[in-house]
């Protein structure tokens, strides 16, 4: 949605030109060790971007995971742009990473654990029509993770939304 500042100006440096947001109440599970599309986020702006402007991406989501006899298993997340690929400073670590905090004594109770995560990225797109998707990967395939819910399959443990907000900012 375009933003009207009332003074007729839309080109002053640092102004937000338009905002787009995708919210998912679904969940995605897997244990792939290469980046895999979650299918939870598919975000585009309503209008083409102005060439040279920047985009600020803000990601919020929750992670659940199964127990596999150890206290933690790292997961990594990144935003992919259909025309630019992975959008992060580090192709290995992605945009944000973490795990559900637990211990060896957590046992099967680990399936009830849930960790909120967030990350942001300011970048200059190479296209005026970017399309964004959330990708995930595990460091070790022995553990399964669930994005958007605790790992338990009871809907009472669906604990949070997956949200990506994108803001076009004049440069």
Image: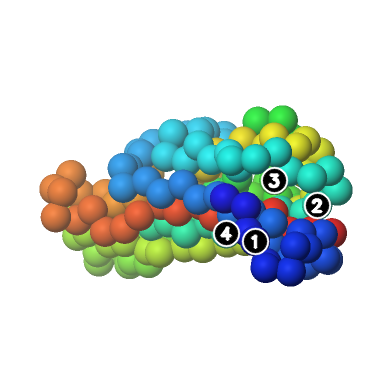
Residue behind mark 1: 4
**Residue pictured at 86% horizontal, 48% vertical:** 52
- CA neighbours of label 3 inside 10 A, class few (<14), some (14 to 19), many (20+): some
Residue behind mark 2: 53
Q: CA distance from mark 1 to mark 3?
A: 29 Å
Secondary structure, mark 1, is: loop
Q: Position of residue 29 (x, y in %)?
A: 35, 39
Circle nearer the N terminus (1, 3):
1
The answer to whether the residues at label 3 and label 2 have Cβ atoms under 8 Å apart is no
The answer to whether the residues at label 2 and label 4 have Cβ atoms under 8 Å apart is no
Q: CA distance from mark 3 to mark 4?
A: 12 Å
Nearest the camera: 40 or 10? 10
Q: Quadrant of residue 71?
A: bottom left
- CA neighbours of label 1 inside 10 A, class few (<14), some (14 to 19), many (20+): few
Circle nearer the N terminus (1, 2):
1
Circle nearer the N terminus (3, 2):
2
Q: Is residue 147 left or right of residue 15?
A: left
Mark nearer the viewer, 1 or 2: 1
Residue 105's disc number: none
Q: Is residue 152 above or below residue 169?
A: above
Q: CA distance from mark 4 to mark 1?
A: 22 Å
Nearest the camera: 82 or 92? 82
Q: Position of residue 1 (x, y in %)?
A: 57, 50
Nearest the camera: 120 or 71? 120
Residue 87's disc number: 3
Secondary structure, mark 2, is: loop
Residue 58's disc number: 4
């Amino acid at each position: 949605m375009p933003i009207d500042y009332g003074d007729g100006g839309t080109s002053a440096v640092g102004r937000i030109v338009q905002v787009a947001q995708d919210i998912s109440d679904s969940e995605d599970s897997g244990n792939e060790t290469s980046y895999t599309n979650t299918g939870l986020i598919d975000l585009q702006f309503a209008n083409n971007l102005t060439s040279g402007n920047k985009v600020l991406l803000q990601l919020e989501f929750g992670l659940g995971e199964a127990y596999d006899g150890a206290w933690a298993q790292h997961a990594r997340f990144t935003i992919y742009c259909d025309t630019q690929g992975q959008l992060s400073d580090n192709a290995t670590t992605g945009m944000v990473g973490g795990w559900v905090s637990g211990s060896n004594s957590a046992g099967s109770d680990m399936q009830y654990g849930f960790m909120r995560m967030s990350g942001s990225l300011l970048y200059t797109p190479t296209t005026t029509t970017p399309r964004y998707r959330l990708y995930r990967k595990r460091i070790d395939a022995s553990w399964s993770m669930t994005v958007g819910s605790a790992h338990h399959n009871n809907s009472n443990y669906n604990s949070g939304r997956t949200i990506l907000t994108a803001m076009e900012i004049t440069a």
